[in-house]
Amino acid sequence: MSAIAVKEVKERVIGDNDLVAKTVRNDLKEKGVFLVNLMASPGAGKTTTLVRTIEALKDKYKIGVMEADVDSTVDAETIEATGAKVIQLHTGGSCHMDADMTKRGLEAMGYEDLDVVFLENVGNLVCPAEFDVGAAKKVMILSVPEGDDKPLKYPLMFSVSDCLLINKTDAMEVFDFDMERLKQAVRGLNPGMPVYPISSLKGEGYDEWLAWLTGEIEAWRHGGTEIGG
Amino acid sequence: MSAIAVKEVKERVIGDNDLVAKTVRNDLKEKGVFLVNLMASPGAGKTTTLVRTIEALKDKYKIGVMEADVDSTVDAETIEATGAKVIQLHTGGSCHMDADMTKRGLEAMGYEDLDVVFLENVGNLVCPAEFDVGAAKKVMILSVPEGDDKPLKYPLMFSVSDCLLINKTDAMEVFDFDMERLKQAVRGLNPGMPVYPISSLKGEGYDEWLAWLTGEIEAWRHGGTEIGG
């Protein structure tokens, strides 16, 4: 039996999500903790990507992971094996995390001694895009089997993200996925956003993604980065 | 330029979704219209599956499709090419359809002369599971690349559905998907639910799915089927 901590973070009516998000972000900035809001569809490879990313960075940073899920602790158990600090958040049926839920999750996990925290948001391309949780950066994963037309159908998610990982590139040949068509649609919604094709299964394409992530972490912790969305 | 009808069906506060759903279902039963609530993750293959299913049934039934989406009309354009009656519903940011939105969609499309209506719900495994829209049957698609662990993570969707299609079986070898493990987890949540592996890309596995669907349509239109969820 695993001893993973589980915290219920059911949504509650709060006045102003953006205001709470700002408070969370300012507090994290002050403490030098870099929070990533990781968003994707179910099965896009969030957990596998996290495991590889943690393995690559764990000698350099103290890492925590908040696994948000409607139910179950399967992802938290996978993450725990990496040695990262982990907490399972159950959202009580809610299809997204908001800033207040994130704040309660951080407090339940304990975050002051960490350098980097990943919030694995609920698998969903709609609602999570609407809620600023107070993260330093929002990272989205789209997987090849989902198709290259997704920016047309879920424009908000592509618009609000700071970095886009295209996962499962090892399956490119099985699926009719046009990377150029995808990139063009993304540029129309979010011109400056970096797009990194990766295979988390095979560990391919990680150099660029890790370079971007490390650069952002360092800028957040030591630089005078403007506090953004 | 396509002339697809688009209807805004933003969610509004209504008293009792289950009551509206019951009204919708009774009205459809009376008129002999079989409504399918089709639910899946983004990119699981809802539209491709619909196209193949319509092609197989269109000589036998008059078919309508309501394409629910946060934005865009790409799916409706694909469906229109089959000759089925089609309307695009924009949910105004809502991540699911409810019974009242479905009622307004049916009225905007015109449904009295149809035999079968498919509602392609918003791509999401969480919220659509919570809302009875008034359909005769709920059909869920899970695609192989999403993984065989999804029943653990989205138990409600697997519990409320009446039929489960496992799509993209042509990609089984690329992904580490254990069909027996999946079926076992599904049986734990929903013992009687039929599970049909299909490939909508290649048109494989359709005989059983179409036999089930046709049987349910006939029972609804001519038999004394009990009106269920």
Image: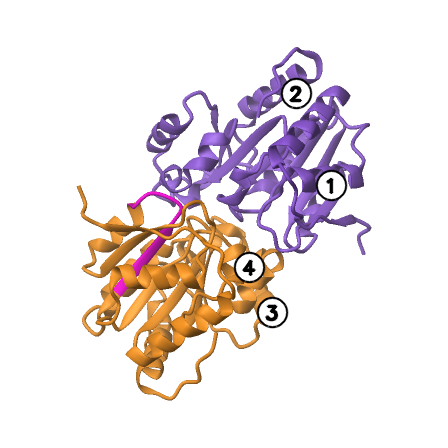
Chain colours: A purple, B orange
Could you tell me which secondary element the residue under label 2 belongs to? helix
* Earlier sequence position, callout 2 versus callout 1: 1
Marks 3 and 4 sit apart, C-alpha to C-alpha, by 17 Å
Mark 1 neighbour class, 10 Å CA radius: few under 14, some 14 to 19, many 20 or more = many
Residue A220 located left or right of residue A40: right
Mark 4 or 2: in front is 2
Chain hosting mark 3 = B
Q: Residue at x 30, y 49 (%)?
A: B75
Mark 1 or 4: in front is 1
Could you tell me which secondary element the residue under label 4 belongs to? loop
Give the labeled residue for mark 1: A105
Are the numbered discs 4 and 2 placed on the same chain, yes or no? no
Give the labeled residue for mark 4: B178
Q: Is residue B54 above or below residue B201?
A: below
The percent position of residue B12, horizontal first and vertical second, equals: 46, 54
For the residue marked with disc 3, what is the amino acid?
Leu
Q: Quadrant of residue B52?
A: bottom left
Chain hosting mark 1 = A
Depth check: A128 or A49 in front?
A128
Task: Look at the magenta stretch and give its main secondary structure.
Answer: strand
Q: Quadrant of residue A62?
A: top right
